[in-house]
Amino acid sequence: MIMSPPVLSVSNLCVDARTPEGLRRVLDDISFDLISGETLCIAGESGSGKSVTSLSIMGLLPKASLQVSSGSIMLGGKDLTKLSGSAMRAVRGGEVAMVFQEPMTSLNPVMSIGAQMREAIHEHQGEEGGAADVIARHMLDAVHITDPARRLTQYPHELSGGMRQRVMIAMALSCRPKVLIADEPTTALDVTVQAQILTLMRELKTEFGACIILITHDMGVVAEMADRVIIMQSGRVIEQGNVLPIFQSPAQTYTRELLAAVPRLGSHAGSDGPPRVTPVPASPVSLDPSPVLAVSNLTVTYGGAGGFLFKRKQAAAAVQGVSFDIRPGQTLGLVGESGSGKSTTGKAVLGLIPFAGDVVIDGRNIAGLSQRQMQPVRRSAQMIFQDPYASLDPRMAVGAAIAEPLIIHGIGDKTERADRVAELLARVGLQPDAASRYPHEFSGGQRQRICIARALALKPKLIVADESVAALDVSVRARVLDLMLELQETMGLAYLFISHDMAVVERMSHHVAVMRGGKIVEMGTRRDVFENPRDDYTRALMAAVPIPDPKRRVA
Amino acid sequence: MVFLILRRLGQTALILLGVAAITFLLLYALPADPARMIAGRSATAQTVANIRTQLGLDQPLLTQFWTYLQGIVQGNLGRSYAQKTDVGALIAARLPATLVLMAAGICVEVVLGVIFGVIAALKRGGMVDRVVMMASFVGVSAPQFVVALLLLYVFAVTLGWFPMSGFGSAAHVVLPAATLGILGAGWYARMVRSAMIDVLNQDYVRTARAKGLSSARIVFRHALPNALLPIIAMIGIDIGQFMGGVVVVEAVYGWPGIGQLAWQAIQQVDIPIIMGVTLVSALAIVLGNLLADVIAPLIDPRIRGR
């Protein structure tokens, strides 16, 4: 086989960050080639330098904080690190184009789709007005957007996330780039939409003859897309090679750990509950068989509030007639795509938003209770939120944050509370001295542990975990999930585990409810739902989950 | 859109009613007695009492207010105690001058504010940014009469570029408008700066850069329209701020607008004029906000068709 010369060749690239303490290396001696027609996946966890690598190629490093210190990026005989500003502008969007993670915010909200597409076409191909319009329409057609002529006149907010990402791809490919860099292009999308976008990218790669650099943290996506893989960790390339060998016989420990941490859908087939993480105690925790949470006919409607003078909007039901029970020591996984009403259900269950229907927590019906009457109920039901960065007060020491629920409920005196905080920190695997430190000193995984400790402070019986691990890297995520399982086994906690991630839900749940459009479309034991799904939507959801095994890739 | 305007007009009526009630109450609470002021120092108690009856000031507060409201509904703002003429006519004669001054003032503040705000945002952290922010701080903090006197001294007395005071030609507008606008320009420069910095960090600006667009296009086509959205809403609110400034500026420059009218009326406890000017100002503020609400959808497609 004759190797064609690489389209893009990165060699010995080093990037430094300017910090008050001087330069700090963020990319250390990165080298790789991109061969014509291939998809190269750069995989790694947050902070591994995968996004900095792509921004370096695009010449989009924020000048104030990052600089290329040495090395070269060769594209067709040009060293991109040495190009002038205007020469680099011609490359950017012309020869190398990029698609970003957040389709919701990556398009200018006050410009029409057409205007945004035309300006890229004008910039690199010199086509204006009608001619640019024809190209734009053709591109929207290529990414399978219906009614392209009308879409061009629409604005980003009129399009769904998946459609916006299609527009981004159309825009990136409109100037026929040699290299398309896609930085986590499907991370913000629902799993069924992700599957469509990935298929589209494979299709377009052949059609447009571009090669793709796909940056992702998701080994499932890597397995489905990559010809070759680069594994990065803290600014270095740990391992690179063809996709099959990397998945089958990874050479490096880190790669093995990364692959092992990936939850695989179907890997728990044949068992009824999550795997035990603690040894079976001599005297098992005796659990009350009556449900700790019983929800019946829960309906939540948003909007519909009367405005000042005659303005009234039609109310829309976000959740409609939802019923389920959770027993002590059990987990109900609530799974669904964005807008399915799963988070709304979680909030309603804790009385955080008004609802109709009955919610019985630990024997008390909270329907119609005032905030004051809710107070004792809140002791037995707590919540862990998605974003561990936003759900801790940055100006409150960790110990104070964990003690706050105790103070609110008037439990213990100062020393007793301090003891309890230390005990809780130890319980979630943190050092006792964490109490006097502040949230910014902790990593995402540690912060989520702090949030769990705070939720445990009142010794609740039920915890609502809303996408609690979605913001965490896979390896960290696996450890936080293990912690949650361990707490459940030793304390008999019941979880309402809300997630969009089928594999995580499969790992955590005893029972599973699949939500769509505000209703539960299918509910049953974990084994029933995952091994024998009855609803078409459940099947579609499961089929769309990328499988972290390149051998099982759909040809 | 038509629905929005209709709804706003309904709200406007309520707001004006509230403003009228509060102003009426405040004026009633004043220790000064308009009848005594009109009658003069040497008048007998009998004369004062006669005047009071004649003006209806001996009636209970509610009756007075009711009579006043009836007048307003018929388009009658009452008669001035001191000038013995129709308040509506007095205001109508003075209003155009004030509107010219305000329009010019708004232009000054918006144009200066946007220009310097954008420059500061693009050069943030640098010398230019610091100088602009310093200047805007001075602009925001300087009392208007000081700014007015300073401008008069430099541009009218020393350089002789613009007339000292009066009304009539375009040259007359420059210094009053500048005085009125400098305070707001400082505000707007700061707001535009922070809005621009925020917008320049948005994902869609990164997308624009990734498309290889020029810096000028990124700033003016992509960033600025987004940064101006919050500013437009501010301009509506700002008109209220302006009304306060108008009184000072008109007094300093001898500008024959409603600010001067109000100033004289306050000194003379000429309640009908004070009421009239207050209501007209309130109306201007409400209409200014309505205008901002009508303009915003032209720039922002997300709030169109609501």
Image (spheres, coloured by chain):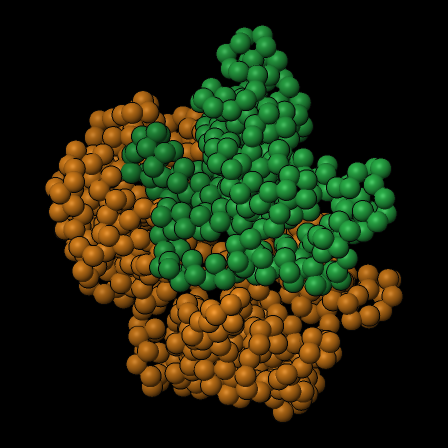
Res A353 → quadrant: bottom right
- Residue shown at the point (57%, 82%) measured from the top left: A330
- Residue shown at the point (39%, 40%) measured from the top left: B225
Q: Is residue A273 above or below residue B60?
A: below
User: Is A148 placed left or right of A315 in the picture?
Assistant: left
Residue A410 seen from this side: yes
Question: Any idea which chain is the orange one in this picture?
Answer: A
B9 and B190: which one is in front? B9
User: Is B144 placed left or right of A156 in the picture?
Assistant: right
Q: Is residue A200 above or below residue A271?
A: above
Find the residue positioned furthest to the bottom: A289
Res A329 → quadrant: bottom right
- Residue shown at the point (67%, 59%) measured from the top left: B65
B302 and B208: which one is in front? B302
Quadrant placement of the N terminus of chain B: bottom left
Percent of width and height locating residue B38: 75, 41
Quadrant placement of the C terminus of chain B: bottom left
- Residue shown at the point (41%, 37%) measured from the top left: B224
Percent of width and height locating residue A332: 52, 80
In this structure image, what is the colour of chain B? green
